Image (cartoon, helix red, strand yellow):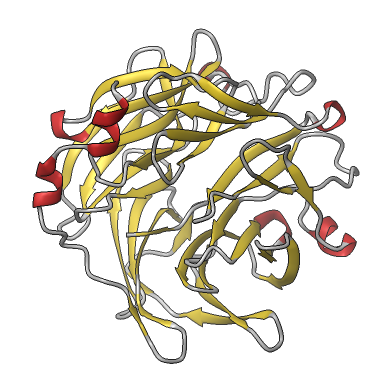
Amino acid sequence: MNRRTFTKGLLAFYAVPSVVPPIAFGGNGYSQAICLASASTDRSGKHYLSLLNTANKKVHSVQLPGRAHHVISHPKLAVVAVVSRRPGYFLTIFNRHTAEVTHTINAENDYHFFGHGVYSSDGRYLITAENRISTGLGVIVIRDALTDYRVVSRFPSNGIGPHQIKLNLNEDVIIVANGGILTHPDRGREKLNLDTMSPSLDYIDVSSGKVLESHKLSADLHQISIRHIDVNQQEKVVLVMQYQGDKYDDVPLVGVHRRGESIKLLRAPNDINLKMKQYCGSVCFDAGGEYFAVSSPKGDLITFWRAEDNKFVSASRCRDACGIASSGVAEFIVSNGLGELYRYAISRKLHVFEKQKIVLESDHQLAFDNHLSLV
């Protein structure tokens, strides 16, 4: 696919007015009306796309054919793409106002989804991380929304188990968190290569699929799976990880990266690092790119970090919390497996994040899945 075609898109998308309501911010710094989305599951095991409104506190849920992982918001239209959890085969496109299914995408033969994806900024292209089952190697797949999400490009992710992917600011490079863990649908979610896993952070040219940079951790840390990433306005990448080694090992779980440099690993204070239980579930920069939040659901913990100097700021206990979305400058919304939603905003005098529960009304008793998205 030609880079100019990818980055420019078609004028048709820009000609369609956005129907997504704006986010309103109050004078106290807290966001007053935010629309969010998350995959969810009820007590009977049914799976949903849940749409959350923090203004009226309502949750509207639409049943899905299976468990989903990440909800991707279209940047121009009231559309969301819901990606199935690994190893999943469905990707469903919804109108988020009407809950109408507009497209149902099945993974192509010999492929399955890894749960994550991203739209280009014009909404023309949907990019997903996938697995080629016969080889066990990761693949990046680009689909054109204007041709009913037809596959227009496919190239290797340069690793095994690509999970979260992001675009750089110019949208000419895809940033890939290759987790390094080999799985096969016939074996469910069993991890098949823990002794030889080799996770990496990769930068891949959109137009050619050429690997521009590939970064790995040191050999003694090869079992730290790079899973989730975010990138701020200065193109600083934050990466969070899940350790697959001995349960008594004390390893760093957060890192940052800039192009042309090596991955820099960060550590929370010792007691906090241990409470993270070798597992980070999600990461998100705030709207200003000044702070980032990291969830550790196994440790019932959210940690906050300052991007400028990579310093740990504070931690907050939040039971089974995993999903994180930015709700403004120095603000985050966090969801958990109990169906709860919390707002965190920084106290600049104390340099700690203050926690406020958002009480929701839902027709279901839901457990929110791993990720939370602004829509």
Q: Is residue 363 left or right of residue 251?
A: left
Q: Estimate the x, y position of residue 307 in percent, counting from the top left.
A: 65, 61
Instruction: Give percent across and percent down for residue 371.
Output: 49, 53
* Residue 105 horizontal/vertical position (percent): 26, 30
Q: Nearer the viewer, residue 337 or 195?
A: 195
Q: Does residue 252 appear to the left or right of 366 in the view shown?
A: right
Q: Is residue 336 visible?
A: no
Point 27% across, 22% down: residue: 151
Report whether 371 appears left or right of 21. Answer: right
Against 239, is 162 above or below?
above
Q: Nearer the viewer, residue 19 or 355?
A: 19
Left or right: residue 323 compared with residue 207 = right
Q: Residue furthest bottom?
A: 27
Q: Which of the pair 117/192 is nearer the observer? A: 117
Q: Residue at x 81, y 60 (%)?
A: 268
237, above or below 177, in the image? below
Residue 343 on image: x %, y %: 51, 76
**As displayed, is residue 363 above or below residue 106?**
below
Residue displayed at 81% across by 55% down: 267
Residue found at x 69% / y 35%: 225
